[in-house]
Image (cartoon, helix red, strand yellow):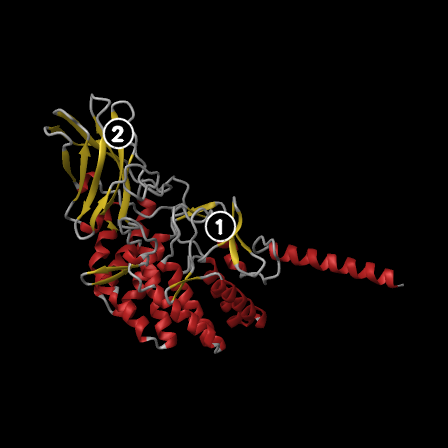
């Protein structure tokens, strides 16, 4: 009798387990199906994220290394669960949001008194070669922990949020994400050798800081928000790409220079990139990271030099200094890679070369200071692309985030600059169906329906 009951119980357990898996797989593939399913309208987004849950309930990304905890997935899922809870989904969603939050906080590192959720080198999530953190991710954690504090009254969430707020004030030169500018601050989504000023990351970060200040009454957060407004107003026109009816994703971009000479032994041995308002950035003797200036080996009678330029100095040009190993007088020709905009490219496709000049090297170990005209480097700071894939379709995610964020900032600050550009960039979308660069490319020329601010 006991054996029969045990077998029946086992059968029922298996049936229930299979049912749970089938139900959950309608939302997202989960190797640890202990978390309630996220909202159905986010199904394609989570599929694009390759999202699954780790054993402690934290969301991760499926990579070649297995399921890896993704720093920014926590805030996404917490907001989704809280929305389901607020819409009557039940306590299970509040409990799930707290489980994700506590698992995320437990994974954070301490930097001084601050909490940071690091992106680890080689984890299959970040392409960077060193551990770092992101202002975008930190600010989203700040906001969702503020929401959890407001919902639950648990001081633990507010205390943790205040430690995250501290991370947003650490300058980039000290390993942080705050760029100090003459007229304020800029929060960097991805700290890099040359400041990137990623527009969706910058604006999303400061909006989350503002919303946190409104929930908690934090004057420190409100002050941090307003420190970013003057630089953003000043730099916003630099993101506008009127001839493509588009916006730039960021202000920096990498491009190859090519030095050509009849002498196979001639090569560039050092140099730097000079960006007015930003600084002087050395060129490494070797490297592979496209977001760091570096030299390539000589091949035949030519050598490639990877440089990162920035439109932040516009209309003033960037300059590149190259130091050669010549012993005798000789001449060298320098060219810059160029290409056209492609909706399905994340950076300028190098299709051809433009002449920068032919230079005579008179002295041993000659130095050249080469001016980079903007008409030859206009697409280095590349416009937003249509590479975000939801289901079988490709969409432009970031242009719409730019519009949405700038519109929200206009409402908060009453800035005419923000309002004008939000309107202008919104009108650009109406032009896309009549522009040859976008039609018949296989991309969707509208906003994805489930696109939200946290993407």
**Quarter assignment of residue 217:** bottom left
In the rendered view, would you say 353 is above or below 290? above
The residue that mark 2 highlights is: 303
Quadrant (top left/top right/bottom left/bottom right) for the C terminus: bottom left
Q: Position of residue 77 (x, y in %)?
A: 49, 61
Q: Nearer the viewer, residue 17 or 224?
A: 224
Q: Is residue 20 left or right of residue 448?
A: right
- How far apart in space, not on screen, are marks 1 and 2 (Cα)? 39 Å
Q: Is residue 144 left or right of residue 66?
A: left
Q: Secondary structure at mark 2?
A: strand
Residue 420 in view here: no
What residue do we see at 52% from left, 63% from top? 103
Local crowd size for mark 1, using a 10 Å CA cut-off: few (<14), some (14–19), many (≥20): some
Residue 9 in view here: yes
Q: Position of residue 151 (x, y in %)?
A: 48, 75
Quadrant (top left/top right/bottom left/bottom right) for the N terminus: bottom right
What residue do we see at 29% from left, 65% from top? 409
What residue do we see at 20% from left, 21% from top? 262
Q: Secondary structure at mark 1?
A: helix
Q: Position of residue 96 (x, y in %)?
A: 55, 67
Q: Nearer the viewer, residue 183 or 390?
A: 183
The residue that mark 1 highlights is: 48
In the rendered view, would you say 348 is above or below 220? above
């Amino acid at each position: 009798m006991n054996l029969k009951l045990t077998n029946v119980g086992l059968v029922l357990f298996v049936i229930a387990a299979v049912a749970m898996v089938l139900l959950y797989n309608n939302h997202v593939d989960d190797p640890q199906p202990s978390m309630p399913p996220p909202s159905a309208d986010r199904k394609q987004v989570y599929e694009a994220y390759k999202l699954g849950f780790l054993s402690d309930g934290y969301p991760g990304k499926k990579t070649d290394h297995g399921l890896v905890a993704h720093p920014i997935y926590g805030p996404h899922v917490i907001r989704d669960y809280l929305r389901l809870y607020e819409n009557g989904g039940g306590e299970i969603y509040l409990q799930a949001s707290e489980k994700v939050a506590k698992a995320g906080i437990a994974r954070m590192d301490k930097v001084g008194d601050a909490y940071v959720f690091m992106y680890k080198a080689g984890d299959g999530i970040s392409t960077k070669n060193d551990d770092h953190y992101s202002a975008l991710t930190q600010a989203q954690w700040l906001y969702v922990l503020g929401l959890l504090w407001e919902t639950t009254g648990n001081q633990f969430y507010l205390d943790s949020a205040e430690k995250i707020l501290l991370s947003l004030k650490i300058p980039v030169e000290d390993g942080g994400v705050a760029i100090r500018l003459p007229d304020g601050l800029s929060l960097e989504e991805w700290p890099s050798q040359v400041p990137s000023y990623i527009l969706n990351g910058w604006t999303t970060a400061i909006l989350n800081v503002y919303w946190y200040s409104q929930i908690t009454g934090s004057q420190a957060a409100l002050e941090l928000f307003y420190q970013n407004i003057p630089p953003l107003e000043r730099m916003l026109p630099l993101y506008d790409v009127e001839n493509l009816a588009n916006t730039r994703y960021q202000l920096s971009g990498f491009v190859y220079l090519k030095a050509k000479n009849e002498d196979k032994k001639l090569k560039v041995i050092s140099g730097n990139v000079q960006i007015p308002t930003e600084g002087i950035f050395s060129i490494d003797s070797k490297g592979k990271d496209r977001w760091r200036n570096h030299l390539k080996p000589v091949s035949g009678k030519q050598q490639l030099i990877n440089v990162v330029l920035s439109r932040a100095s516009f209309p003033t040009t960037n300059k590149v200094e190259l130091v050669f190993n010549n012993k005798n007088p000789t001449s060298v020709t320098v060219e810059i890679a160029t290409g056209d905009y492609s909706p399905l490219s994340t950076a300028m496709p190098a299709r051809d070369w433009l002449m920068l000049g032919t230079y005579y090297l008179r002295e041993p170990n000659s130095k050249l200071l080469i001016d980079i005209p903007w008409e030859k480097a206009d697409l280095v700071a590349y416009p937003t692309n249509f590479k975000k894939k939801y289901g079988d379709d490709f969409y432009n995610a970031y242009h719409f985030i730019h519009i949405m964020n700038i519109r929200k900032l206009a409402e908060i600050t009453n800035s005419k600059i923000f309002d004008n550009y939000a309107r202008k960039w919104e009108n650009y979308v109406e032009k896309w169906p009549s522009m040859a660069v976008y039609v018949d490319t296989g991309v969707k020329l509208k906003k994805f329906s489930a696109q939200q601010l946290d993407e």
